[in-house]
Image: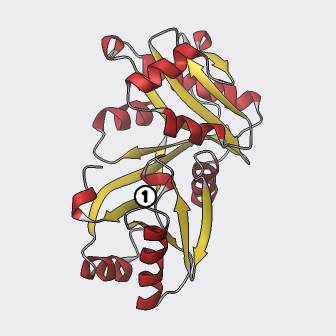
């Protein structure tokens, strides 16, 4: 088994395998154009020291893109969190980056997982039924490296892609009627098998900290937290 991947490698892989439609700089902030792909591809991030005017420029830049102000902060960015609070932005969900070296332990039935690119109509239908609609599927299509849509019949689907030595899993979805059957575990194991075939040495995933079921799934496969972040947004966007 290889060593656990460095946190920075995991974060870079999560970004590269779920990319924004475009990025641009606003002073020390990196702005992401999401085009409906979700918070992870729409949030601004500080790339270095900032002053209050830089925060205002970042907010103006997001508004110019037609996006509501949205920032992604690491736990240590307390001064930025306070500045955003003064502008009316509130903290939202905490997201955990989890990773494990490959190979994962054996999982019965993992070999039944199929991998396709582009996704088959049945895979797209599963995603759409679970809320991963066209805009989020376009995020997958933007990935430059190796990628695959994984499926276990009509029971579940996931997206996996490689960036450097790390493969990342996104949009894992199990059909409601097939939950509690180990489908998610088999999809993750199938992702690990695919990643190993691409030469990756680690598998990663991003999970909302309050998603207890997902945390149980991933911890049971050996994935451990290596980084975390929190979104800050306007109160009216908290449920978006």
Residue for point 57% across, 15% down: 121
Q: Is the N terminus in the top left, top right, bottom left or bottom right quadrant?
A: top right
Is residue 221 at least partly visible in the picture?
Answer: no
Q: Is residue 70 above or below residue 10?
A: below
Q: Position of residue 209 (x, y in %)?
A: 33, 48
**Location of residue 215 by image quarter:** top left
Q: Is residue 69 above or below residue 98?
A: below
Q: Is residue 168 above or below residue 54?
A: above
- Camera-side residue: 58 or 18? 58
**Location of residue 193 by image quarter:** top right
- Camera-side residue: 187 or 122? 122
User: In the image, is 82 to the left or to the right of 202?
Assistant: left
Is residue 205 at least partly visible in the picture?
Answer: yes
Residue for point 50% across, 69% down: 45
Q: Position of residue 57 (x, y in %)?
A: 47, 82
Q: Is the residue marked by circle 1 packed among few (<14), some (14-19), or many (20+) residues within 10 Å? A: some
Residue denoted by label 1: 228
Assign a secondary structure to mark 1.
strand
Colouring used for the render: secondary structure
Q: How many marks?
A: 1
Q: Position of residue 68 (x, y in %)?
A: 37, 63
Q: Position of residue 49 (x, y in %)?
A: 52, 86
- Camera-side residue: 132 or 147? 132
Residue for point 30% across, 40% down: 211
Residue for point 41% across, 83% down: 56
């Amino acid at each position: 088994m290889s060593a656990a991947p460095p946190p920075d490698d995991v974060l870079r892989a999560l970004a590269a395998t779920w990319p924004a439609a475009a990025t641009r700089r606003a002073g020390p902030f990196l702005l992401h154009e999401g085009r409906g792909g979700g918070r992870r591809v729409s949030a601004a991030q500080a790339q270095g020291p900032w002053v209050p005017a830089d925060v205002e420029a970042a907010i103006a830049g997001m508004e110019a893109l037609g996006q509501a102000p949205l920032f992604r902060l690491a736990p240590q960015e307390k001064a930025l969190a306070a500045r955003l609070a003064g502008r009316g932005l509130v903290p939202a969900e905490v997201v955990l980056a989890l990773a494990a070296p490959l190979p994962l332990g054996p999982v019965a039935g993992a070999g039944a997982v199929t991998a396709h690119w582009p996704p088959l109509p049945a895979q797209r239908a599963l995603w759409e039924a679970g809320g991963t609609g066209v805009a989020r599927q376009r995020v997958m299509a933007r990935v430059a490296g190796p990628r695959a849509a994984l499926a276990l019949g009509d029971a579940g689907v996931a997206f996996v892609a490689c960036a450097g030595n790390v493969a990342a899993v996104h949009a894992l979805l199990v059909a409601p009627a097939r939950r509690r059957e180990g489908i998610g575990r088999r999809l993750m194991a199938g992702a690990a098998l695919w990643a190993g075939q691409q030469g990756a040495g680690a598998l990663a995933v991003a999970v909302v900290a309050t998603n207890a079921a997902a945390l149980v799934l991933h911890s049971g496969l050996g994935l451990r937290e290596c980084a975390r972040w929190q979104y800050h947004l306007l109160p009216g966007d908290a449920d978006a």
